[in-house]
Image (tube, grey):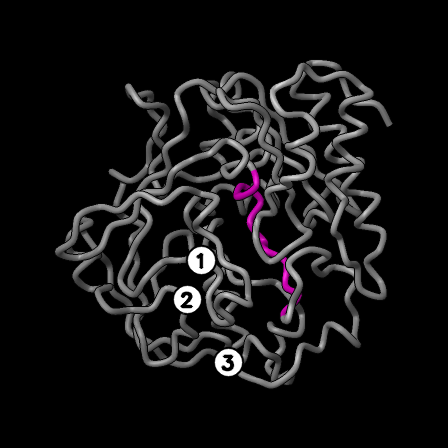
Amino acid sequence: MMKAFDYLVAENLEAAAGAYAGADPNGNGNGKVALKAGGIDLLDLMKQRIETPQAILSIDRLDDLRYIRQEDDGVHIGALTTLAQMGASDLLAQRYAALHQAAADTATPQVRQRATIAGNLCQRPRCWYYRNPEFDCLKNGGDRCFVRDGENEHHAVFGGGPCHILHPSNVAPALVALNAVLVVHAAEAEPQRIDAAEFFVLPRQSMFAENVLEPGQIITEIILPAEPRHSATVEVREKQSFDWPLCTASVARLGGGWRICLGAVAPIPWLSEPAMRVVADRDITAELAAEAGEAAAQGATPLSDNGYKVDLIKVVTRRALMAAAGLGVRS
């Protein structure tokens, strides 16, 4: 049963920032204001009593934060743009295939109609121990991670612990691969720009936060670079209907070479430096893609039941590079 709460509706960004000032975007929401866009994750958290805020601040009426438009420095996407709108965008499909594919394949059509790009980036972990109030895990303020000795087939193989969550965002690996920039706003402050690769934090850096947002900060915009050359996202799931990816690879060839980011294998979108060193700025061949796949799995430390992710990392990395290079995807 949900705890009673006040429901606030912001009519403009300034009002939203003022009402949200001081609220911790990574807190447990107890006694605080919780920000609501599409509300997909927030409602789940409240039903599970992981978050019990005194008030919810809805920014869903801020239609000026819903857009996909070309500007001089690249393509700008408003924070409240839905995944459905991104999946229907010809501009993204033609120039930013990695992001378009990630958005278009997320969850179900019903979820994509409500879920926003900023909300997708700021989801809380889906770890079943964290989401179960009966387990006093590290991320809930306890003294142990139940994953190590428990059911861990859907947990991290990179990141080194001590908490082994996966980052749940479908679009985050694509944004990191594309070297996107996030714009954040706070009351009485200048907008701040954060590289997507620097936005997410590991548990050893901050146990109770998954990103660098400070109290009162709201994501308002995502900026994609002006000249991506090739990109693709490949996911592997247990089933092709509504399911979380078992492993994801998003790749993009930018001015400085290929960027390769893995998803569903670490507490953050995992930028694979070994794989990026292998491909550098070379033209992709089937052999080079396979070599990069092997490199992408370097350093993985699987738990008792998720060793299969090591093989999937090799597969999705190879397939994503070949797809981005227009070589098709082999089994």
Circle 2 sits in a helix, a strand or a loop, which is it? loop
Q: Residue at x 65, y 21 (%)?
A: 324
The residue to which callout 3 is attached is 1
Comparing 154 with 131, the one in front is 154
Q: Main secondary structure of the magenta part?
A: loop
- Nearer the N terminus, badge 1 or badge 3? 3
Which picture quadrant has residue 103?
A: top right
Q: Are marks 2 and 1 in contact (CB under 8 Å)?
A: yes
Image check: 20 left or right of 148? left
* Disc 1 crowd, CA 10 A, few/some/many (<14, 14-19, 20+): many
**Range covered by the magenta-colored residues:** 163-173
Mark sitting on residue 211:
1
* Disc 3 crowd, CA 10 A, few/some/many (<14, 14-19, 20+): few
The residue to which callout 2 is attached is 26
Residue 235: where, in percent of width, then height?
70, 38
Per the model, the C-alpha gap separating discs 2 and 1 is 8 Å
Mark sitting on residue 38:
none
Q: What's under tag 3, amino acid-wise? A: Met
Which picture quadrant has residue 317?
A: top right
Comparing 313 with 122, the one in front is 313
Residue 136: where, in percent of width, then height?
61, 84
The reply to whether the magenta stretch includes residue 58 is no
Q: What's under tag 1, amino acid-wise? A: Asn
Circle 1 sits in a helix, a strand or a loop, which is it? loop
